[in-house]
Amino acid sequence: MGTLDPLSNKIAIIRASTTPGIDIDYLFLQADLKRMILDDSINCGNIIAAVAPYAVESGLIKVGSGERTIMIRNLNTNVIVESTIATKNGNVVYEGDIKIDGVPGTGAPIALNFKNSIGSVTEKLFPTGEKLNVINGIYVSCIDVSVPLIIIRANELGIIGDEPPELLNSNKSFLRKIELIRKEVAYLANLGDVSNKVIPKIAIVSKPRKSGTITSRYFIPHQCHSTHAVTGLLALSAAINIRGTTAYHVVHNNYQNRMLKPSQIIIEHPAGKIQTESVVEESNCGYVIKKSSVTRTARLLFKGELILP
């Protein structure tokens, strides 16, 4: 059904929740058909956009007309997501004028607000214990907000940062270099051997080329994403707002040493841009993410039964 592309080999398993305050439980599985494995270690932000519409379509949730907020718990990470969808006469409204770069057509907005997303896998904001680490002579930051993400400046890897995915995916020595970094950071983060795991992910960042905040090439982890993952967007946006990370350095220097205020952050990716609202506050107990939200769309493709052998 999904060919060999990891971006279209994603599985969502959904049920009505019995937990007070939660409407839907959602388990995400990433299928790797080349290695014939299923990875359940992380959440997927793009897939979660379809969870609330599916819950309505399948009869798990009853709706009327107007906006409806559905509380979703991701079972992989225990992150809670508020998903607000448009409804009319008991049905999901899919038609709208929201355009997502890299997605054909337009659709009705699906507003996703991610709660308690710090330490989604590692239970730490900075899994290595530091905002900045030096791995094989290269500065990296590893942050866990919705997903463990390693952030590396493009110039430290000998690239510009706005290369097309196919060029990066064909550079085998480059891919080996970032995989070695990924494995080393994983050990520092107590994630163990991640050879057969999709976490931690990697974002290679550089200054924006257009009107964005930063340019990112996102790896999942062994090939460059054709656009950008939502969970990676949330992690990168949080890092941009925290002094001392590689992402902060890129943005801070580009803005001529002007401190960022919590605001809309625009990530430039190979197919355009993606926007989020990321509000991070520092307290005596560390950092608190006050808001981590993004707008997506979804549409009904088909209904049917897949017969397994």
Image (tube, helix red, strand yellow):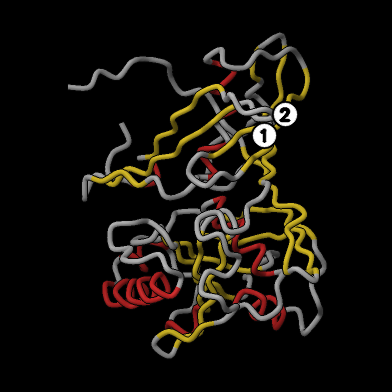
> What label sits on residue 33 in the rendered view?
none
Which quadrant would residue 248 be assigned to in this image? bottom right
Which quadrant would residue 81 be assigned to in this image? top right
The answer to whether residue 55 is left or right of residue 171 is right
- Residue 101: percent from the left, percent from the top? 58, 47
Which quadrant would residue 17 be assigned to in this image? top right
Considering the image in quadrants, where does the N terminus appear?
top left
Q: Badge 1 local density, few (<14 within 10 Å), some, or many (20+)?
A: many
**Residue 178 vertical placement versus 236 (above, below):** below
**Residue occupying image coordinates x 67% and y 27%:** 20
**Residue occupying image coordinates x 39% and y 39%:** 10
* Helix, strand or loop under label 1: strand
**Residue 299 vertical placement versus 221 (above, below):** above
Which residue is label 2 attached to? 69
Which residue is label 1 attached to? 83
Q: Amino acid at mark 1?
A: Ser
* Helix, strand or loop under label 2: strand
- Residue 48: percent from the left, percent from the top? 55, 37
- Residue 227: percent from the left, percent from the top? 50, 53
List the single residue furthest toward the top. Answer: 89
The answer to whether residue 185 is left or right of residue 127 is left
**Residue occupying image coordinates x 55% and y 52%:** 231
**Residue occupying image coordinates x 62% and y 17%:** 61
Q: Amino acid at mark 2?
A: Thr
Q: Rounded to the nearest whole Å, what is the CA distance between mark 2 and mark 1?
A: 5 Å
Asked whether the residues under the numbered discs 2 and 1 touch, taking CB atoms below 8 Å apart as contact, a structural biologist would say yes
List the single residue furthest toward the left. Answer: 309
> Mark 2 or mark 1: which comes first in sequence?
2
**Residue 12 vertical placement versus 264 (above, below):** above
- Residue 277: percent from the left, percent from the top? 74, 54
Considering the image in quadrants, where does the C terminus appear?
top left
